[in-house]
């Protein structure tokens, strides 16, 4: 029954990747920008949650909501300050700015609190129970539950609400959407807010599940989530979810086969393979570049 | 305009830097002069004191190690001086901050040997910084003793020759692996063991290798060997593998940042075998990360334990608490021992106390009983002494046993 255990391990890891990947993919879908600062918003979410629980004695659900709210605001500020004015410049300029913002956030946090790691308090009872011989922790189920709820919520927002409709319209053709009377700036801000809120939630969940948080914790999960987004087809929301889960399970399988030192490499080999074999990703359609 | 502005700021910066340098120079000169005056008391010539240098990390990345050693050393020197010094001569201790930096450590060593003319010095706390001072020690013929540089390369150079003037008071890395293996097979009666090592650190790899060798010599079997790298977060898949190999003991050499998570995740997937590590586990952060419950049934090897019932150790703990009102850690104990280690050698060095005579005496140290064990220096200038095994009980380190080499 070892493989059930490994599957649970993989899905727990994958759902965190999926939550971060959603933000990447939404932003890319709407302004074609790979927001490398996204992993650092995830880190900020983890720290906001940590201070909310430890310093202000908040319940962890409240802390999760607070982290989502503050991360949404941070996401909008980043967009307004750094990316908005670059909207009509080259893509590479925006990309480099995104890397700059990423470093700025990381080292601002280090400046104010140092680089030492912090241990998340044990807010969820760490009980395990056995299903088919596999030990499954309450925390794993909680992560999975919160991730699924947030993803369903996101699907609802994108497909059933007015702002979701606007987002889809802007993503399809920003100029046409503007002509139809859609406020493109606000729609882009809303996209950043939702994406960053998901990253903030992922940060808190990550803290609870893995305990150790530190200022540079967003770098590797951020890159992995980027791989997940590309794997699923960047710009496509269900693609990010599936891509995240697949990546988590693949990494776990690589470790389970005894190649644990190759695990990080496996993620990036997937990136290379997908870019060579199917650049549009699992869910992507091959569209011709419009001339 | 931009240029002139820059020039202006540039010159201002330079001037202030110069000024700061001059002032700092004055400051330190003043203080060291007054230090000497007060200690020499005017009546005795400078030849009447024995000068020992301390080249330690008092600031920078590993400042906590260096300052702990410094505190321990100062306590020992106060005790010796209060009891009349060594052969009637008082010890004069000169501590220099090497800022946790290799180059600064070498400079500090030269300063101590050349300007302060010390007869011996405490080498830096970390192996890397200590290695940087070895050449100075050999050149000026001033013995250096590192309290906590555990890498073999401090006392033995890359050709395998002994660095004549380098010594240490801690045991070396591979020794902890041997102790852990003996503890596993003898005390815990383990037969099937697993190794899960940090593949990105030489320290952990060295421990894993010596542990494996000793386990096989003791008749045990390594059923599975896995590795991780520093900064990993998810260990569950590998731990699940280890669990399915069904070991009755898991050795995890590494540092507390990852080990904390490993211990927590191991217990979560139901890997309940005893886990063991070495001094890299020794940090309060470990308990925060893993949680006290998960840490039950885990062990570490360390240099010393404040909970050791040995009266000699309890006396030291009491003296330390009286002086600094906190419990001494392993670095405090090693710093304290380093001074007594030197004292013993200086006493045996004869009438002429020089770097050369002390070096000879240090190399001949035998059965010297100190806080962190009974010292006999071997041909590679490493002390042969016991290690302490500690057990975590609800997040607290309990003294378990002492294992002799």
Image (cartoon, coloured by chain):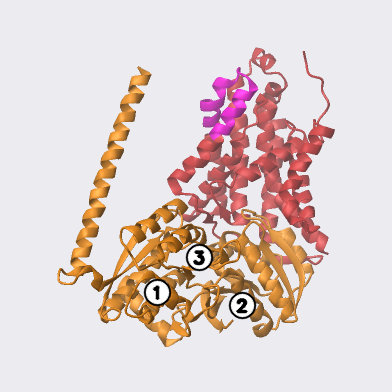
Chain colours: A red, B orange
Residue that numbered label 3 is attached to: B149
Give the residue at x 72% y 79%.
B217
Label whose residue precedes the other's in the sequence (2 or 3): 3
Asked if the magenta segment contains residue A94, the reply would be: yes
Circles 2 and 3 on the same subunit: yes
Part of the protein shown in magenta = A77-101
Looking at the rendered structure, the secondary structure element under dot 2 is helix
Q: Which of marks 1 and 2 is nearer the N terminus?
A: 2
Q: Same chain for marks 1 and 2?
A: yes
Question: In the visual, does A148 lie left or right of A76?
Answer: right
Q: In this view, does B152 lie above or below B4?
A: below
Disc 3 is placed on an element classified as loop
Q: Which mark is residue B358?
A: 1
Can you see residue B296?
no
**Residue A14: mark in rendering:** none
- Please tell me whether the stretch drawn in magenta is mainly helix, strand or loop: helix
In which image quadrant can residue B34 be found?
bottom left
Residue, x 68% and y 22% (percent of image)? A170
Residue A283, image x and y in percent?
81, 34
Label 1 secondary element: helix
Crowding around mark 3 (Cα neighbors within 10 Å: few <14, some 14 to 19, many 20+) is many
The residue at which mark 2 appears reads as B179
């Amino acid at each position: 029954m070892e493989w059930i255990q490994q599957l649970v391990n993989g899905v727990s890891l994958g759902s965190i990747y999926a939550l971060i990947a959603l933000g990447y993919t939404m932003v890319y879908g709407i302004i074609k920008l790979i927001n490398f600062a996204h992993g650092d918003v995830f880190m900020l979410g983890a720290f906001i949650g940590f201070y909310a629980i430890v310093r202000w004695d908040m319940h962890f659900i409240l802390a999760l909501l607070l982290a989502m709210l503050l991360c949404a605001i941070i996401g909008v500020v980043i967009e307004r300050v750094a990316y908005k004015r670059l909207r009509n410049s080259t893509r590479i300029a925006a990309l480099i700015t995104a890397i700059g913002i990423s470093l700025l956030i990381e080292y601002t946090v280090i400046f104010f609190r140092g680089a030492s790691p912090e241990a998340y308090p044990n807010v969820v009872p760490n009980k395990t129970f056995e299903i088919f011989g596999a030990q499954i922790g309450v925390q794993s189920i909680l992560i999975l539950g919160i991730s699924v709820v947030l993803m369903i919520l996101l699907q609802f927002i994108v497909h059933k609400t007015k702002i979701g409709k606007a987002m889809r319209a802007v993503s399809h053709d920003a100029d046409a959407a503007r002509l139809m009377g859609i406020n493109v700036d606000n729609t882009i801000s809303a996209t950043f807010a939702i994406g960053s809120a998901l990253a903030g939630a992922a940060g808190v969940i990550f803290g609870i599940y893995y305990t150790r948080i530190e200022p540079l914790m967003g770098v590797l999960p951020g890159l992995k989530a980027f791989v997940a987004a590309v794997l699923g087809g960047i710009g496509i929301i269900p693609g990010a979810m599936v891509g995240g889960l697949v990546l988590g399970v693949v990494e776990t399988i690589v470790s389970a086969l005894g190649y644990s030192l190759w695990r990080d490499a496996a993620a990036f080999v997937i990136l290379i393979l997908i870019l060579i074999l199917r650049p549009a990703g699992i869910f992507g359609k091959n569209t011709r570049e419009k001339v | 305009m931009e240029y002139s502005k820059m020039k202006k700021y540039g010159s201002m910066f330079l001037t202030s830097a110069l000024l700061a340098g001059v002032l700092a120079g004055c400051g330190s000169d003043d203080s060291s002069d007054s230090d000497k005056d007060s200690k020499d008391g005017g009546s005795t010539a400078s030849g009447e004191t024995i000068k020992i240098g301390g080249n330690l990390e008092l600031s920078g990345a590993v400042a906590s190690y260096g300052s702990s050693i410094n505190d321990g050393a100062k306590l020992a020197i106060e005790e010796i001086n209060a009891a009349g010094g060594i052969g009637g001569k008082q010890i004069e201790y000169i501590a220099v901050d090497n800022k946790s930096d290799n180059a600064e450590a070498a400079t500090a060593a030269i300063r101590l040997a050349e300007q302060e003319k010390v007869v011996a010095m405490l080498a830096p706390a970390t192996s890397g910084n200590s290695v940087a001072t070895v050449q100075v020690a050999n050149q000026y013929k001033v013995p250096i003793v590192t309290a906590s540089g555990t890498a073999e390369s401090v006392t033995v150079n890359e050709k395998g020759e002994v660095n004549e003037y380098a010594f240490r008071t801690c045991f070396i890395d591979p020794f902890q692996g041997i102790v852990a293996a003996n503890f596993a097979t003898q005390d815990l009666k383990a037969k099937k063991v697993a190794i899960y090592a940090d593949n990105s650190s030489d320290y952990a790899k060295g421990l894993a290798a010596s542990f494996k060798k000793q386990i096989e010599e003791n008749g045990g079997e390594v059923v599975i060997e896995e590795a991780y790298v520093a900064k990993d977060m998810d260990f569950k898949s590998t731990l699940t593998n280890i669990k399915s190999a069904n070991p009755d003991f898991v050795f995890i050499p590494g540092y507390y940042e990852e080990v904390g998570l490993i211990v927590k995740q191991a217990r979560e997937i139901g890997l309940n075998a005893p886990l063991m590590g070495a001094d890299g586990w020794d940090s309060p952060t470990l308990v925060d990360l893993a949680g006290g419950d998960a840490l039950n049934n885990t062990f570490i090897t360390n240099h010393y334990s404040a909970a050791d019932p040995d009266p000699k150790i309890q006396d030291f703990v009491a003296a330390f608490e009286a002086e600094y009102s906190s419990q001494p850690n392993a670095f405090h104990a090693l710093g304290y021992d380093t001074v007594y280690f030197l004292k013993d050698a200086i006493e045996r060095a004869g009438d002429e106390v020089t770097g050369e005579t002390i070096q000879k005496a240090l190399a001949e140290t035998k059965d010297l009983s100190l806080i962190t064990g009974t010292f006999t220096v071997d041909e590679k200038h490493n002390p042969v002494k016991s290690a302490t095994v500690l057990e975590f009980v609800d997040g607290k380190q309990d003294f378990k046993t002492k294992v002799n080499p």
